[in-house]
Image (cartoon, grey):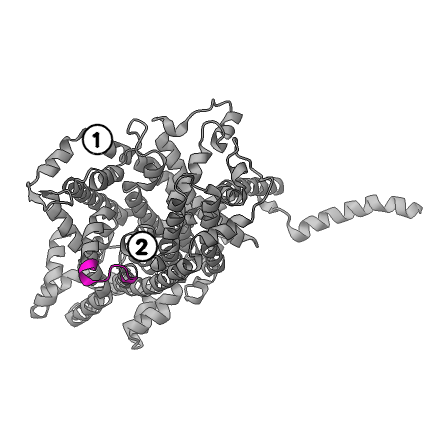
Amino acid sequence: MSASDVVATDTPRTGPSGPGPAADPTARSGPRAGDGTAGTRPVKRKLTGREKRNLRMGLLFISPWIIGVTVFVIYPLIYSFAISLTQYSGMQSPTFIGFQNYIAAFLDPLVRTAVGNTVYYMLLAVPIGLVVALLLALAMNRNVREVALYRTLLYLPSLIPMFALSFIFIVFVNPQYGIVNQFLGLFGMPATNLLGDPQYAKIVMIVMAQLGAGNAALIYLAGLRNIPDTLYEAARIDGASRFRQFFAITVPLLTPTILFNLITGVSGAMMVFTEAFIMTDGGPDNSTLFYMLYLWRNAFSYGQLGFASALAVLLFLFGMLLAGLIYWLSRRFVNYDVSAG
Amino acid sequence: MAINTANPGAQDLGQAPKLKSRSNYGRNADGSRPTRVSAWISRLVMLAVLLLFSLPVYWMIISALKTPEELAQFPPTLFPTELRWENFYDAVTVMPFWTFFRNSAIITISVVVFSVISNFIVAYGFACIEWPGRNKVFFIVLATLFLPFPVTLIPMFDMWAALGFVNTFVPLIVPALFAGGFFTFLLRQFMLQTPRDMLDAARVDGASEWSIAWRIVFPTARPAITVIAIFAAVGTWNDFMGPLIYLQDEDKQTLSIGMEVFRSVNSQDVQFNLLMAASFLVLLPLVILFFIFQRYFVSGITLGGFK
């Protein structure tokens, strides 16, 4: 696969000279989920003109993104990488120090703490978030008259900016009079300062994040509405239970949406920041010192822009690695083929 | 009289089975009782979840209606004893609310329109045209989701300053013209489910890619496009950092910044009731917008020809 991939990018140039290399791109697209019609294509094997036309059209359609990614992503990334190789406070001009910032990042125990906290948050918040959002979406998709109300009420907390929600939650978890503690008190839990306890502070933020599940739920909802009703009708005629319908129709056909929510969930969890910034400022005992918060501190409190840029570049590389892993794994379970129904 | 006393019992016996067979109460085939109970359980769960999710907003509203004295009470009251509606009036007059509102609206509407158009076009290029290497190029779109925002902060400001666009809406609006990231990814995921036969049939009929995109794919992707429009609206309306960095004059500020000005004016004692009143007013247009647009999730697909 990988060998033919390399050839494939060159085919538009070498294509017309011989049918051999020109056949590669069509052969390659066969096993991919997105290119479902590959089976009917070999007839047009010699039509590299069509391949060329498609390439031209494709690039034309994505041209706004090409400009955008160059200006808003690649340029700042190069800029950041350049700064990460310097000692730079933002005041004096930067001095080149090579990879010392990166070495310092690997030796810094606080970076290790921050990575640990972020990974802990990610491992809990992402799977919980995926399930909660799917349940919300199923509730938002109920066939009842007041469904608009369900949708709006469930989406409401997602409309509150995170900083405002953080303020509200500070009161909710207050050890003396907070609603959360009063509720836990019903089950005999003693009043605890949840945000002041390293054991619970991260958990509070993971729970709070679920109030923002409405965003992911909307995406699921759009996905649910994309599933043709005919599939359910057929299943009902065959006597499939609702449970069975959910796991045999809904979940498989939602896999592209689940992939989307998984990747955005991971990228969001990787950069969790605001709630810790406002609610705990990284405490207690650095238990909510997330990677992004530490990065932010280095950049804007400690005036170490070089070191912060190194942290940012490392975070980006790690994110790409994760995205690649998820994307690669997704080819096995993501199903785009709805037309079969 | 005697007939009357005798009849009810007979009628009961006669009618009960009739009712059952006619309206098929609670899906008899699965056992009627458990279904009805589970329906009530799911309704109860629903109610609990709705309560839980409405709690922050409820708390925001009651705080917005409290007098400063009641707000200072411990423990806080769940039902305000005295409703102070003037909080809303004060929140609007402490800052130039309507100027900020107009600025927010201009920026938000522009961003929503541009984002929908540009992301749709780009996603079409990734999902509906099969060109060699597209999956590899698409991975770069994915990768951009993992770009930490401080990375872009300083370089972007330098760039807009060099171009002379600081203190204008340009840095806040123009990036929306160049699709990318979440929205393109989201739309692509949905468009990949468009039946290929439909696109190929249109191509055979001689339709241009452009007209296929707008006439066939755009209507089918409507639920996803609605999601994008909502996210773009919410994100821009609530955006704090963008306006904070790029806008300087007071008459150019947005509502989210206005709240900050409002907070720092009273920095000695943050007037939480006024802050919450302002937050609620800022939230309201989004809620109304969402309430109107949520119906597009329902009407999306039937136009598309999947059925």
Res B79 → quadrant: top right
List the residue tagged with mark 2. Answer: B243
In front of the other: A174 or B221: A174
Report the chain holding disc 1.
A
What's the residue at 45%, 44% (across, down)? A135
**Image quarter (top left, top right, bottom left or bottom right) of the C terminus of chain B:** bottom left
What's the residue at 20%, 61% (across, down)? A66
Q: Is residue B166 magenta?
A: yes
Q: Residue furthest bottom?
A: B206
Q: Position of residue B273 (x, y in %)?
A: 49, 43
Is the residue A207 above or below the residue A73 in the image?
Answer: above
**What residue type is disc 2 on?**
Pro
Nearest to the eye among marks 1 and 2: give it. 2
B56 with respect to A106 (left or right): right
Q: Position of residue A294 (x, y in %)?
A: 24, 37
Which stretch appears magenta? B160-170
List the residue tagged with mark 1. Answer: A110
Element type where label 2 sits in the image: helix
A291 with respect to A81 (left or right): right
Q: Position of residue B100 (x, y in %)?
A: 40, 58
Is the residue B116 above or below the residue A156 in the image?
Answer: below
Q: Residue furthest right?
A: B1
Q: Is residue A79 magenta?
A: no
Pointer 1 with pointer 2, Cβ within 8 A:
no
What's the residue at 37%, 55% (across, down)? B231
